[in-house]
Amino acid sequence: MMEEGLYGLTVGRLNGGDIRFSDHAGSVLLLVNTASECGFTPQYAGLEKLWQTYRDRGLVVIGFPCNQFGGQEPGAAPEIGAFCEKNFGVTFALTEKVDVNGPQAHPVFRFLTEAAPGLLGSKAVKWNFTKFLVDRSGSRVTRFAPTTKPEELAPEIEALLVQQ
């Protein structure tokens, strides 16, 4: 599975169906583990703004709800989706709830954490709203801390969007 990299992977959508990463080959991807009851939850608004600003130029934003950090994503899919839409106007894709660390970590996060280790080479995702920016080839991955606001990613996104 890792031989194909990210484009060989799929993940279930929050509202049913699948997201196939092969469908996004050639796009710049912003992949974020999210939670509805976290101090960083207002970042949903910034993620949505990035999606609205850059989607026509090739940015794909995908949120991965995760309950591994302080139990801050306790709801089921309908509650998560309603919360994100009602409170932050989220229209970018959300996946089914996933683990990002440990033996049950989703293969997408195994790929991302291997490609872009954190501080001191740690593979673990430290908290909600850790962001991974993937270039158009699907091979270069940059990790950003939960404290990095989505709008701070705009220059990096711009740089990746102009690369072919």
Image (tube, rainbow, N blue to C red):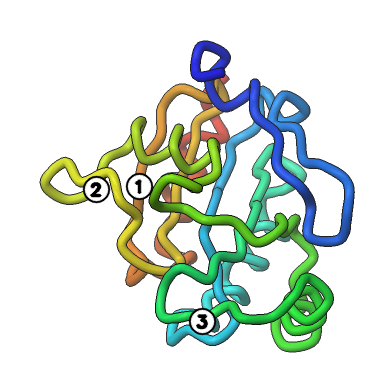
Residue for badge 3: 72
Marked residue nearer the N-terminal end (3 or 1): 3
Q: Nearer the viewer, mark 3 or mark 2?
A: 3
Against 90, residue 136 (above or below) is: above
Q: Which residue is mark 1?
A: 143
- Work out how far the residue at label 3 is from the one at label 2, CA to CA, in angstroms: 22 Å
Report the Cα–Cα distance between label 2 and label 1.
7 Å
Q: Is residue 5 left or right of residue 74?
A: left
Element under disc 3: loop
Q: How busy is the neighbourhood of tag 1: few (under 14 within 10 Å), some, or many (20 plus)?
A: many
Q: Report the amino acid beneath label 2.
A: Gly
**Placement of 8 over or under 58, stated as above or below:** above
Q: In the rendered view of the protein, which quadrant contains the C terminus?
A: top right
Q: Position of residue 127 (x, y in %)?
A: 36, 67
Residue found 51% across the figure and 11% down from its top: 3
Whichever of labels 3 and 2 marks the residue nearer the N terminus, that label is 3
Could you say where residue 120 lies in the image, as x and y percent from the top left? 11, 46
Task: Identify the amino acid type marked 3.
Answer: Gln
Mark 2 and mark 1 lie on one chain; the one further toward the N terminus is 2
SS at mark 2 in the image: loop
User: Quick one: 101 or 26, which is closer to the camera?
Assistant: 101
SS type, badge 1: strand
The reply to whether discs 2 and 1 touch (Cβ–Cβ < 8 Å) is: yes
Q: Residues within 10 Å of mark 3 (few under 14, many from 20)?
A: some
Question: Camera-side residue: 49 or 131?
Answer: 131
Q: x, y (%) of residue 53? A: 68, 57
- The residue carrying mark 2 is 118
Q: CA distance from mark 3 to mark 1?
A: 21 Å
Q: Residue furthest top?
A: 3
Who's the residue at 50% across and 30% down the image? 135
